[in-house]
Amino acid sequence: MQLLIDGELVDGARAIDLVNPADGQVFAAAPCADAAQVERAVAAGQRAFAGWRALDFAERGARIAALADALEGRAEDFAALLTQEQGKPLAEARGEIEGAVAALRYHAGLRLEPVVLKDSATERVVEQRHPLGVAAAIVPWNYPLLLLALKLAPALIAGNVVIAKPAPTTPLTTLMLGALAADIFPAGVVQMLGDAGDVGPMLTAHPGIAHVSFTGSTATGRRVMAAAADTVKRFTLELGGNDPAILLDDADVAAVAPILFDGAMGNAGQVCLGVKRIYAPRALVPALGAALVACAQRAVVGDGRAAGTTIGPVQNAAQYARLVDLLAEARAQGRVLHGGAPMERDGYYIAPTIVTDLPDEARLVREEQFGPIIPLLAYDDEAELVRRVNDGPYGLGASVWTADAARGQAMAARIDSGLVWVNRLFDLPFDVPIGGAKQSGIGRHQGLAGVEEFTQIRIVNAALD
């Protein structure tokens, strides 16, 4: 694999070992950029910006659609590599590739038209939007290709050029996409830089970067904001979440339990908008716990490349160690219904775990676990429920489950979150913008609002004769 800088595939200044989370063994070396290569990429992006922004939407969209076609043509290669570097089951990897292709195609067809605010015989006021310049797309390790597409495509269609930086543990599919992009985009329009952990800060603080689109932890998001302050650069942040699933007293436990289990355990629990804690009326907790345990007993934990695997390993050693600590605390403070320990095998495997009877102060309740461990919490009345659900720094997503959709919507209106589903989960159409509340993020993703994040408003206010 190579970096993509100024239209050329080049070697990195150094390389780091990559570990397959399924067995804990090094399987590849990944090239990483140094400060000189970052400077070269920023300069190349600045040179390319004028020509790219001068193209019309149809011309830019055609290039983005061509990238979607190229990715689709190599879908199986990308899926196999994604499973190897990230750990998710091959079926989930294929789903991520399909999602990335769809995201590219959707955004390729978008247009930002001027908006007339006032129009009379004496004046005309028009809101225009123009691109910002060089955008940095900083992508996490849980969905490295899909989340890249959801940054790359809106930035490009708006007329920006992009430097993408994958997470140090999952760079290969990003760099492989760079090899496709090299044959499609003009030099400097799309660039891909591998990272050993120091490239992100270089980009976020660089005066030549006009916008930073970051997805990751809230702690790192704060550092992105601080780095952007010196140049007052624009940024979009999708940060941590501690997403509650709320059962009302009329919910169908048997129907809802498998959905919640999949929502908590998909991608080994490493989903930004995944279910992180479940609240149910006290009377429903025994039945719901039993139903979740039955789901866990049917789950197959293993190498994502093996047939039949439904839950793969945790992606990296640092996250695995954090989850082992959370499990130890959960065993001490609550009652484990299923799982509760790492699995005795090579690789970063955590048994799907359901824990109940935890206090609200437990880390597994207060923090984003980002792993296949779910707390099941009882409540006695809805006022108490709302207070407990909203008592925390996060507000990314939530879901409400009930036999009465109107009642569910009323409950959703009481939840401090950027997104609340009612009787559904992971419904994320590209034309519906989303964004976090509180410390779960700033800005919007997807839809026209997501494209507008990569633009500057210009108001043209004209007096007419």
Image (cartoon, helix red, strand yellow):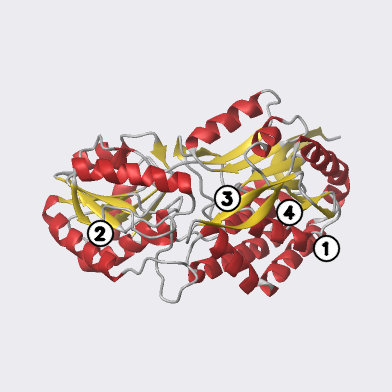
The quarter holding residue 333 reads top left
Mark 3: which amino acid?
Thr
Check residue 183 in the rendering and tell me which mark sits there, or answer none: 1
Say if residue 117 shows up in the picture: no
Left or right of 208 in this view: 88: left
User: Could you tell me the amino acid type at mark 2?
Assistant: Thr
The span from disc 3 to disc 4 (Cα, nearest Å) is 28 Å
For label 1, the SS is: loop
Q: Sequence order check: which comes first, mark 4 or mark 1?
A: 4
Residue of label 2: 402
Q: Which of marks 2 and 1 is nearer the N terminus?
A: 1
Q: In which quarter of the image is residue 66?
A: bottom right
Residue 102 makes an appearance in the image: yes
For badge 4, the amino acid type reads Ile
- For disc 3, the marked residue is 169
Q: Residues under labels 3 and 2: Cα distance?
A: 40 Å
Q: Which of marks 1 and 3 is nearer the N terminus?
A: 3
Element under disc 2: loop
- The amino acid type, in three-letter code, at marker 1 is Asp
User: On the picture, is 383 further left or further right than 8?
Assistant: left
Q: Earlier in the sequence, mark 3 or mark 4?
A: 4
Depth-wise, is mark 2 or mark 1 nearer the camera?
Answer: 1
Query: Which one is closest to the eye, mark 4 or mark 1?
Result: 1
The quadrant of the picture occupied by the N terminus is bottom right
Q: Which of marks 3 and 2 is in front?
A: 3
Left or right placement of residue 295 versus residue 112 in this view: left
Q: Earlier in the sequence, mark 3 or mark 2?
A: 3
Q: Nearer the viewer, residue 437 or 408?
A: 437
Contact, mark 3 vs mark 2 (Cβ under 8 Å): no
Residue underneath mark 4: 157
Foreground tag (1 vs 3)? 3
Whole-Å distance between the Cαs marked 1 and 3?
A: 26 Å
